[in-house]
Amino acid sequence: MRKEQVIERVKALLKDAKGIYFVDYQGIKTGDLNTIRKKLRESAISFSVVKNRLAAIALQEFGILDKALPFLKGPTSILVSRNDEIAPARLLKDFQKNYPFKFKGAIIEKEVFAANQFDLLASIPSRQELLSHLFSSLLSPIAQLIALLEGLLNDLIATLTEMEKKGH
């Protein structure tokens, strides 16, 4: 593939990216990389191995080269997520159990995360989990109020029933 084509491919990869992750894939067998790529694709995450020099050209066009430059040393692969910016971190954490991935850094919504912040990123719950927790937190007081009102209504009905039996 020509340099221009690689640069255009990387630019297409970065377009609309919410999360851009830089990892060192050295030491992972080709067959294992194919398995990893498949799992990443299933999670709507793109994986690309590209020469740092060509990646730098594409990153420059997005105005984030200065942020990414520290991560473009040695063998580098770029993981990009357009949906869930934290999903790559969780998957990489899981992959590290079996493969020697080395997290170099990430750019998420134009913020830089260094290698020492990887565990923090990987521990952030998914958007769906956060929304679920928020929803249950919002419903909890309502459910308690309904239970309280049902109890009061049952007490009122029981009291009125007793009063009716006594002839009041």
Image (cartoon, rainbow, N blue to C red):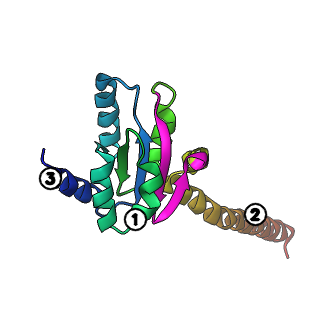
Mark 3 surroundings within 10 Å by alpha-carbon count, few (fewer than 14), some (14 through 19), many (20 or more): few
Mark 1 surroundings within 10 Å by alpha-carbon count, few (fewer than 14), some (14 through 19), many (20 or more): some
Residue 44 appears in view: no
The answer to whether residue 95 is magenta is: no
Q: Quadrant of residue 25?
A: top left
Q: Quadrant of residue 150?
A: bottom right
Q: Earlier in the sequence, mark 1 or mark 2?
A: 1
Q: Earlier in the sequence, mark 3 or mark 2?
A: 3
- Residue at point 46%, 33% (across, down): 101
What residue does disc 3 label?
A: 5
Is the residue 32 above or below the residue 86 in the image? above
Separation of marks 1 and 2 at Cα, in angstroms: 59 Å
Three-letter amino acid code at disc 1? Answer: Ile
Q: Is residue 134 left or right of residue 60?
A: right
User: Does dot 2 land on a helix, a strand or a loop?
Assistant: helix
Of residues 55 and 84, the one drawn nearer to the viewer in this rendering: 55
Task: State the image coordinates of residue 142 (x, y, percent, origin top left).
Answer: 65, 67
Quadrant of the frame with the N terminus: top left
The stretch of residues the image draws in magenta is 100-117
What residue does disc 1 label?
A: 64
Q: Quadrant of residue 12?
A: bottom left
Is the residue 115 above or below the residue 144 in the image? above
Task: State the image coordinates of residue 164 (x, y, percent, origin top left).
Answer: 80, 70
Three-letter amino acid code at disc 3? Answer: Gln
- Label of residue 151 in the image: 2
Is the residue 40 above or below the residue 155 in the image? above
**Marks 1,3: beta carbons within 8 A:** no
